[in-house]
Image: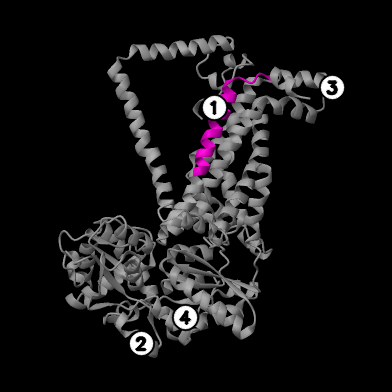
Amino acid sequence: MIRRILPLVVGLLWASSAFAADVTLLNVSYDPTRELYADFNKAFVAAYQKETGKSVEIKQSHGGSGSQARSVIDGLQADVVTLALAYDIDAIAAKGLVAPEWQKRLTLNSSPYTSTIVFLVRKGNPKAIKDWDDLIKPGVQVITPNPKTSGGARWNYLAAWGFAEKKFGSADKAKKFVGDLFKNVPVLDTGARGSTVTFVERGVGDVLLAWENEAFLAQREFGKDKFEIVAPPLSILAEPPVSVVDKVADKKGTRAVAEAYLKYWYTKEGQEIAARNSYRPRDSEIAKEYEKSFAKVELFTIDDVFGGWTKAQKEHFGEGGIFDQIYKN
Amino acid sequence: MSTQTTFVTPATRLQAYSSTADLAISPPSGRDASTRARSAVASKDLRSEPGPIRFIIIALAISFLTIFVVLPLLVVFASAFSKGITAYFAALAEPEALSAIRLTLLVAAISVGLNLVFGVIAAWAIAKFEFPGKTFLITLIDLPFSVSPVISGLVFVLLFGAQGYWGTWLQAHNVQILFAVPGIALATIFVTFPFVARSLIPLMQEQGTQEEEAAISLGASGLQTFFRVTLPNIKWGLLYGVLLCNARAMGEFGAVSVVSGHIRGETNTMPLLVEILYNEYQFVASFAIASLLAMLALITLVVKTVLEQRLDEGQTPRDELRDEP
């Protein structure tokens, strides 16, 4: 009996792997983009087939932005990386896998879509959280991942810092503010999705600091009757960048497809897909069309307030940096 | 497992025909005596405890097991079938699920196969020969048990990663080990290595070398001796080791997670896919895969019990020889 069934099962399992495309790309991305790239890849594959007649298959890998960069450095054969922040691609570039001037190769800092940091609160907003300074009130539990491992968490942290520096006017006061905020954080997950799960499913905390797209997704998955999105008046412009991994793409001979793949982001279709998945599109027409989907938030950039990622990373998240000092106390 | 891993003392080693499970407690006499002694000890223990205490102890054990073992298992199956049987099978038929099942089976086959060979060789060396550094070798075999799986994975990153010791050479020769099947198999082999060797060593030590010596003196070649004398003697212990090895190989998460690269539909094993699907709010799919792993655990448990009985019955070498054609 078993002898007759076993080959059948094995055959079935193996048969499904028979499909092979002309070209295969591996896109190594960060945590919350799973749904975005599922959508985008489908559209690109169809468009590319139509234009060139070639079939292409896109493989995805998702994880914390920092650890994904680490994997690429350790030899994960990514043709393109689409990470949460420029610093992580800089780290890959530092090992010679990506050209140093990678961020200039595509327009708008190689960030075809943007996002920002918003608050996800429970229905009715019981703790009345409207702005960043509500987060340091006693008795408010804030959920955010660990800035050491998570790209989203670094944006969260910098957004809070930017707010405080603007409101109180000095870096010292900003440091105190962010310190107070982290005193209200009961648990630090390693990635953005982990924090969302902690807040949404385990019911821990009063407010989740989240990527705007992640907040919308949680609301879509679990219903508007359970969670509300609160957009603070001021937040950070998060620019998740994309790049071809030169060394891998050249070795595999996939550069042309990889470049076409990333450029597809800048088409109307690509921008529309970003907007549909609650990422803010760059294209002004699409942005206008989806205007109502996104709250009006005054956005500052990391270059304005922190002088770029390299500096921010070193000062705030490096060994013994400000985050370490804050979190120890 | 506890009695299986107990090493044989010189005294008990004399009783060639007793089973391994008895070793920890049996006095150096025949098998019947050991069984009698054991049951005497057991019934005395029970009689010496007053009824209520006995009741409390049993109740505690059962409720502990219910909360920590039975309930979680039930939750897995309940969640897997929460949207009906169609959704359950649809989730398992997803290309990503099939790919994960395929990869898990492949990696388990590779690592069980290799560990079977290595395990027998290692156990053979330790049980039948005397050589310097033997204790050290035994400790080495145990190493994967005491190392955290994440570290096991990182070791392979340090060796085979692009920045690792052999990384440059591997890259230059286009050999992909990390973030591909070879890396996953290596990590799995590492964490599952002790199982086969560990279940064989006590058994082989207990059996000694007399039968092999007899076979050889009667003119059998080395291979003949192995397949006709040694293998039949150890077959139940070997199966037991293979079973545990397989269960761990299919269920390994930590080490595999480090070396996998998480390429969807390519390098995700079943345990990894369970986590990914869970984080994507696809609870039915996640628990459907988890239920397969749970079923594997249940089957392993049943087969393990049967094998333990076989081992306990003390398959005497003479019986085994009679089975031979």
The reply to whether dot 3 and dot 2 touch (C-beta < 8 Å) is no
Q: Which residue is mark 3?
A: B219
Labels 4 and 1 positioned on one and the same chain: no
Q: In the picture, which quadrant includes the N terminus of chain A?
A: top right
Residue placed at 40% from the left, 38% from the top? B70
Mark 3 vs mark 4, CA separation in Å: 76 Å
Image coordinates of residue A47 in percent, x first then y, are 56, 82
Labels 4 and 2 positioned on one and the same chain: yes
Element at label 3: loop
Which range of residues does the magenta coloring cover?
B295-317
**Label 3 lies in what chain?**
B
Q: Which residue is more in the foreground, B253 or B127?
A: B253
Element at label 4: helix
Residue A103 is marked as 4
Callout 3 environment at 10 Å: few (<14), some (14 to 19), or many (20+)?
A: few
Residue B129 is marked as none
> Tag 2: residue type?
Glu
Mark 3 vs mark 2, CA separation in Å: 89 Å
> Tag 1: residue type?
Gln
Q: Which residue is mark 2?
A: A289
Instruction: Return the disc, 4 or 2, that comes first in the chain's sequence.
Output: 4
Residue A155 image-quadrant placement: bottom left
**Label 2 lies in what chain?**
A
> Tag 3: residue type?
Gly
Q: Does B214 sit left or right of A61 as displayed?
A: right
Residue A187 in view in this figure: yes
Mark 1 vs mark 3, CA separation in Å: 33 Å
Q: Which residue is mark 1?
A: B4
